Amino acid sequence: MSYISEKIKEFFPDLAIMKNSANNSLFAGRNLPSFVKDYIIRRFSYEDGLVDRAKVSDYLENKMPDNIVTIKNRLLAGEQVNVTVRFVIKSDLASGRTTFSIPDAQISSNAYIASTLMEEYKDELVDGERWGNITLNYVEPQGRRSGYIEMVAYKSFDPYKIDYSYFMSARQNFKHLRQRIKVILRVLGRDIHQRVPLLIHLLDKEIPGNGIILCNNVH
């Protein structure tokens, strides 16, 4: 393990995770953003950084199935479906209801959020894209009314809480600009060896003599 990796593990013990090709392979074929994958790896990692691959696979299969397009088939079969997914909320002025879509499941219409959820989470369930754990039911057609999917339960996928004092205290252990850039690149999953010299060069060119001061003042 490199020197910067050891420092990250020492001073960010609650956030550090092992990112390598073996762990990344657990998510092959899944359209998941980095923050979701990082959360899952951290959740099922031991203190030594090793990941319980079986538990990760079980979690993904139960909460984030790769064949997510089968959601509609399961709903039509009368099953209540609980998944953690990316969904898009849109207010429908014509009907006075709030609709949602799940692009990865090919659900783009006839899907509504229950009014009770809208009342409970009115500050969260606003127009736009969200990640969350949701429970879906299928409401069968009645008379002239078409059938539709209804979201009946919701929990925001928000696993991280930002403690600024924690980061500001920990950063005192990364006093050099080069070290701080390496930490940032590690967070972004970028190649340290290729980019650190370039960034140092750009900082020297753009803000000569002020690079460290500028970095120290970024909170």
Image (cartoon, rainbow, N blue to C red):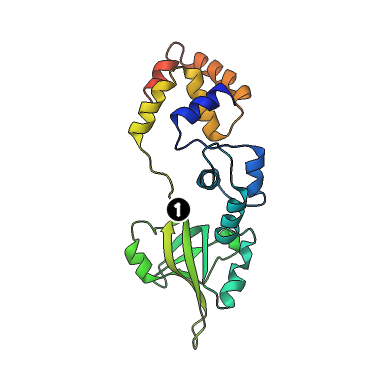
Residue 205: percent from left, percent from top: 52, 14
Q: Which residue is mark 1?
A: 157
Quarter of the figure with residue 20: top right
Q: Is residue 219 visible?
A: no
Camera-side residue of 42 and 163? 42
In the displayed image of the protein, which residue is found farthest to the top?
209
Question: How packed is label 1: few (under 14 Cα within 10 Å), some, or many (20 or more)?
Answer: some
Task: Give the residue at x 57% y 59%.
Answer: 103
Task: Give the residue at x 58% y 77%.
Answer: 76
Camera-side residue of 163 and 114? 163
Q: Amino acid at mark 1?
A: Phe
- Looking at the picture, does residue 108 appear above or below residue 13? below
Position of 101 compared to 156: left or right?
right
In the displayed image of the protein, which residue is found farthest to the bottom?
143
Pick the quarter of the image with the N terminus: top right
User: How many tags in the picture?
Assistant: 1
Q: Is residue 133 visible?
A: yes
Task: Give the residue at x 45% y 53%.
Answer: 157
Pick the quarter of the image with the C terminus: top left
Quarter of the figure with residue 25: top right
Residue 37: percent from left, percent from top: 55, 46
Task: Give the residue at x 59% y 47%.
Answer: 52
Residue 167: percent from left, percent from top: 39, 31
Camera-side residue of 34 and 12? 12
Circle 1: element type: loop
Camera-side residue of 198 and 156? 156
Position of 136 compared to 168: left or right?
right
Residue 71: percent from left, percent from top: 59, 68
